[in-house]
Image (tube, rainbow, N blue to C red):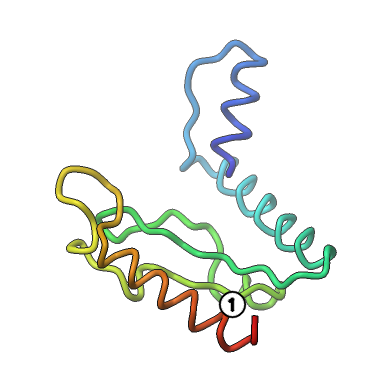
C-alpha cells in the first residue's frame, strides 16, 4: 500500500525511486492497513486481510496476526498453505492449484460466517 502512496508522492516531488523496506515506508503501510480495517468496520463489514506471498513464500506484510485480529479483522496468510509449486514456473502468478487453495481458505472463512 505504501508503494502506491510513495509513487504518487514521488511524482509530485519529481523523484524517481522509493524503498518499500525503509522504516518510514513500513510505518506508513501499517498505518494505511489499520485505517483500511477501521474504515471497513465503520461501514458495517468485517475486514478480511489476505496475505499473498511472493513465489518464494515470503511476504513483507508488516502486521502480525495478533495485531490484525486485535483490530477486528480476519487474517488469511497464504504462507500457511501455498507452496512454490502453486505458482507458474515462468512468472509469479498462482496456477490452478494455487487458486484452488486460496478459494478453499476464503470459503472456510466466508462459509463459517453464513455469507
In the rendered image of this protein, does residue 96 appear above or below residue 23? below
Q: Residues within 10 Å of mark 1 (few under 14, many from 20)?
A: few
* Closer to the camera in the image, 84 or 112: 112
- Image coordinates for residue 37, horizontal then vertical, percent: 71, 62
- Image coordinates for residue 110, horizontal then vertical, percent: 57, 79
- Image coordinates for residue 94, horizontal then vertical, percent: 29, 56
User: Which residue appears at 75% of the width and 62% of the height?
Assistant: 40
Q: Quadrant of the N terminus?
A: top right
User: Which residue appears at 17% of the width and 63% of the height?
Assistant: 85
Q: Quadrant of the C terminus?
A: bottom right
Judge from the rendering whether residue 71 lies leftward or rightward of residue 97; answer left or right. Answer: right
Judge from the rendering whether residue 10 lies leftward or rightward of residue 103; answer left or right. Answer: right
- Image coordinates for residue 91, horizontal then vertical, percent: 23, 43
| Residue sitting farthest toward the top | 14
User: Which residue appears at 64% of the width and 87% of the height?
Assistant: 114
User: Which residue appears at 57% of the width and 65% of the height?
Assistant: 49
Q: SS class of the residue under badge 1? A: helix
Q: Number of callouts in the render?
A: 1
In the rendered image of this protein, does residue 84 appear above or below residue 69? above
* Closer to the camera in the image, 25 or 78: 78
Identify residue for label 1.
Answer: 66
| Quarter of the figure with residue 86 | bottom left
Amino acid at each position: 500500500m505504501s508503494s502506491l502512496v510513495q509513487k504518487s508522492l514521488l511524482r509530485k516531488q519529481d523523484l524517481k525511486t522509493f524503498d518499500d523496506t525503509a522504516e518510514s515506508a513500513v510505518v506508513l503501510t501499517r498505518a494505511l492497513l489499520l485505517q483500511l480495517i477501521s474504515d471497513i468496520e465503520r461501514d458495517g463489514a468485517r475486514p478480511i486481510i489476505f496475505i499473498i506471498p511472493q513465489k518464494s513464500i515470503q511476504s513483507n506484510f508488516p502486521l502480525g496476526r495478533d495485531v490484525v485480529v486485535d483490530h477486528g479483522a480476519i487474517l488469511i496468510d497464504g504462507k500457511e498453505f501455498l507452496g512454490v509449486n502453486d505458482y507458474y514456473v515462468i512468472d509469479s502468478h498462482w496456477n490452478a492449484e494455487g487458486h484452488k487453495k486460496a478459494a478453499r481458505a476464503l470459503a472456510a472463512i466466508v462459509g463459517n460466517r453464513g455469507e
